[in-house]
């Protein structure tokens, strides 16, 4: 029987048929502002608040204080308390980029990865992670090594990735094939703002709902709606909007 890790995000666990496969690595892709970091903050915060699962948050783009402010702005009021007591461990850009060498950064993380106290990991973002490497072969080698270490230590991981195209099928990178699951966050402009959607394109070992579902971001984070038929990403001639 496949063990699952619940995200605790309204509507997302339902379309995942229970949650993300435990010990897997899932890529969360989207264009800027789509909600990737918000989803990851929720994943870590809900783990502690709802499921008694500790988390590690690796951010190459923020410092710890910025991350705390972002979490609290979403209503994750106990974030600082969880960080202080060790239920959430934050490695920010000041720490991860200090040596400008991935092997050195990995050494910092191994003790925590090998500590059975932690269950969830976020890597935000893969684009910054890739700056450590000089070529595609080296990037692929270290990404495989990194995901193997996470899986071997029973860690369920989300990695964020910048998606340049509005419609994800037009831009598929190597990292999509190296991870166990792919979740796309999509936003399309409207006259009054943007419409937001989530598409779970792949989840190994798991039956999933592969429709594109509407979502919203508000106080409390992301909420996914089940009424997919009321929304469409495609025009009548089936070209991306």
Image (cartoon, rainbow, N blue to C red):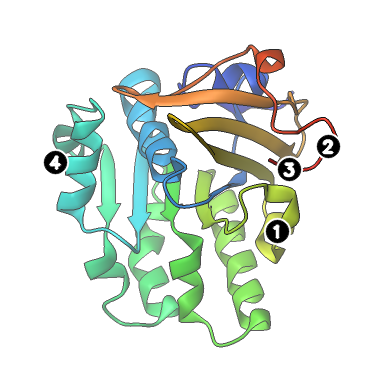
Which residue is label 3 attached to?
Answer: 240
Residue 96 visible in image: yes
Q: Given this view, does label 1 or label 2 mark the residue nearer the observer?
A: 2
Tally of marks: 4
Residue 21 visible in image: no
Residue positioned most to the bottom: 134
Q: Which mark is residue 84?
A: 4
Q: Which mark is residue 238?
A: 2
Residue at 28% in and 66% down: 93
- Disc 1 versus disc 2: distance between alpha carbons? 17 Å
Q: Which mark is residue 20?
A: none
Q: Check disc 4: other Cα within 10 Å, few if <14, some if 14-19, many if 20+.
A: few
Tell me where residue 183 appears, x and y as whole percent: 62, 40
Q: Given this view, does label 4 or label 3 mark the residue nearer the observer?
A: 3
* Lower sequence index among marks 4 and 1: 4
- Disc 4 versus disc 1: distance between alpha carbons? 40 Å
Which residue is label 1 attached to?
Answer: 171
* Lower sequence index among marks 1 and 2: 1
């Amino acid at each position: 029987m496949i063990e699952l890790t619940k995200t605790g995000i309204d509507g997302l666990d339902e379309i995942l048929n229970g949650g993300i496969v435990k010990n897997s690595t899932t890529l969360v892709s989207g264009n800027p502002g789509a909600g990737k970091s918000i989803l990851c903050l929720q994943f870590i915060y809900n783990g502690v608040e709802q499921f008694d699962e500790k988390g590690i948050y690796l951010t190459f783009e923020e410092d710890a204080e910025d991350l705390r402010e972002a979490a609290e702005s979403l209503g994750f009021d106990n974030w600082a308390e969880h960080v202080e007591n060790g239920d959430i461990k934050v490695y920010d850009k000041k720490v991860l980029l200090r040596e400008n060498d991935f092997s050195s950064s990995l050494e910092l993380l191994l003790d925590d990865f090998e500590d059975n106290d932690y269950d969830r990991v976020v890597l935000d973002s893969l684009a910054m992670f890739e700056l450590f490497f000089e070529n595609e072969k080296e990037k692929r080698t270290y990404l495989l090594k990194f995901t193997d270490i996470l899986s071997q230590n029973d860690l369920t991981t989300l990695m964020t990735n910048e998606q340049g195209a509005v419609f994800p099928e037009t831009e598929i990178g190597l990292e999509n094939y190296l991870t166990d699951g792919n979740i796309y966050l999509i936003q399309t402009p409207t006259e009054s703002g943007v419409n937001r959607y989530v598409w779970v394109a792949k989840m190994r070992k798991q039956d999933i709902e592969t429709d594109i579902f509407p979502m919203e971001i508000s106080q409390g984070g992301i909420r996914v709606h089940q009424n997919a038929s009321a929304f469409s990403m495609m025009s009548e001639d089936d070209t991306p909007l």
